[in-house]
Amino acid sequence: MSGVTYAVRDSATMLRRNLRRMARYPSMTLMLVGQPLLFLLLFVYVFGGTMGAGLPGAAAGGRGDYLTFITPGILMMTVASVSIGTAVLVATDMTNGIIDRFRTMAIAKVSVLTGHVLGAMIQTAFALVVVVGVAFLIGLDSGASVLQWSGLAALLALVSLAMTWFAVALGLASPDPETASNLPMIFVLLPFVGSGFVPVASMPSGLRWFAEHQPFTPIMDAFRGLLAGSPAGPDVLWAVGWCAVIGSAGYAWSRRLYRTRAAH
Amino acid sequence: MVGMTKETSAIEVAGLRKAYGDLEVIAGVDLSVPAGTVYALLGPNGAGKTTTVRILSTLLPADAGQARVAGYDVRREAERVRASIGVTGQFSAVEELLTGRENLRLMADLGHLDRRRAESVVGRLLERFDLVGAADRRAVTYSGGMKRRLDLAMTLVAGPRLIFLDEPTTGLDPRSRRDLWGIVRELVAGGVTVFLTTQYLEEADQLADRIGVLDGGRLVAEGSAAELKRLVPGGHVELQVADGERVAELARRLPGAVPDAGALTVTVPHDGSLAALRRLLDGIGDDGAVTGLAVRTPDLDDVFLALTGRPAAEEVPA
């Protein structure tokens, strides 16, 4: 078999290993999916009435309109939340003797990391389906066509790929699983300082500048456009661009750390 | 001649060096392990044992020196080395959320064994390592000894002809230790070469054809267990003495005796022979001064004391 065939086969083996670990540790997945769900319900039912009325222009309305407004932020938060689990799993690998075992075996080196990335993407897809399902159950209204839904799914997959590679790097860089579980927390909170929960125009100028320029804002705006059935080209392009930056930085950093870092 | 050496040597190391900053961990090690034999690297914590294993198993690049493992250069032909070796590290390398069987299957898949062969190898290893009853339980529920057995079984799935065992019995109870020794002996009987590290002379003594004593990154002695024991001035006899006056008196009278007035003991060097023991007893007399006696064979402490001039227990910086 060629090197590529081995890389695929070893990655599939590592993927099975990670899916098994996730299945055996369901409380972790539950926590990762529960976090964005909690924010969704909290924001819709506790703050939704007031916040919805405060939305500017045509969007202004009630609880239901606020649900529509924050769904993109909740999707972003879901992807970020699952990346916590990825960082923890990677860091656990690195603090355990198992990583040295893998490194002394004649296997495709990249497979240890691709196994994590593929597993995390499946976990993210599961989490997103649950979150979107609940959003629909509580009354999400979407004007998106099948094509736009496919576009949203593709963009979500891209965002999740980028965030996962970054989470893998954070896991490799963490001295222990505890640190690994704290580092990605910033990504869970980043949608708040962006267009996730309030229009950025309502923020004071300094914060507003940050909110307008941070990577999650165009990504969430692109989600919002696709969900509404009226995607804006520039948002989507910016979103794809940021994913490319975050993903390739995460990938390069991961490879470098994996090569140079002994198990700690 | 060079070609012959290569064929029969599982490990060839010359002038190996490794430093972390200013701290030299391996300071020029040469060693050779013939195929099909057991080599034990003996030394206290921080002597450089684990670093040596990490270099030889491709985990760590050396700063200088040559190392060939299974006929391949560890630096330039790392992939080929990895395909030839099995490594059981100091820290448990089992996947705790998976069952014993799943752990072995994981190794079989990564070793690219086909399904039928994987199943037969996994079944055989479970049996051989006495894990059949626990095969479908998660490894997190295993005892320390069972985890070590599973760890070693995982190392053997792909059928390596050369295995590294880094302190395989540290932290194990005496029975598990003995079980593991039995397994190592079986492996060797099957033609596998074993390179192990240990802090226990007894372990090296039980298993190894050759023992290298590592101290501060240098091999201070090398040989069979019997040869090493000849290097040290034997063990000692410890006499329990009735009172402090007698301690001082015996210490003056017996050659090489070391008194301990606090513990009321006198330690006398002893070469292990019956004749010497008889001479010692004759010299003590029968007046009730000595209330007890213990003969100690050479242990790691004695070997270290003799070879390095300080006890093994004294920590060398890692």
Image (cartoon, rainbow, N blue to C red):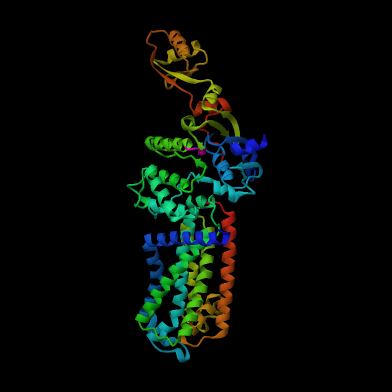
For the point 48% across and 51% down, the residue is: A98
Q: Is residue B193 magenta?
A: yes
Looking at the image, the residue that sits furthest to the front is: B116
- In this view, the residue farthest toward the left is B133
Question: Is A70 a magenta residue?
Answer: no
Q: What residue is at 37 percent from the left and 59 percent from the top?
A: A24
Quick check: A111 above or below A48? Answer: above
Report the magenta stretch's main SS: loop
Residue A26 is left or right of residue A99, and the answer is: left
- In this rendering, the answer to whether A200 lies above or below B209 is below
- Residue A107 shows up from this direction: yes
**Vertical arrangement, residue B3 with respect to residue A86, above or below:** above
Q: x%, y% of residue A121?
A: 47, 68
Q: Quadrant of residue B228?
A: top right
Query: A50 or A238, which is in the foreground?
Result: A238
| Among the 4 quarters of the image, the one containing residue B177 | top left
| Residue B196 % position (x, y) | 51, 38
**Is A232 or B74 nearer to us in this picture?**
B74
* Figure quadrant of the N terminus of chain A: bottom right
Count of marks, rendered view: 0
Magenta span of residues: B190-194
> What percent of the width, then of the height, locates residue B31?
61, 35
| Image: A253 above or below B262 | below
> Is residue B59 at all visible to an observer of this figure?
no
Q: Is B294 or B34 nearer to us in this picture?
A: B34
Residue in the foreground of this view, choosing between B141 and A85 = B141
Q: Position of residue B189 (x, y in %)?
A: 47, 35
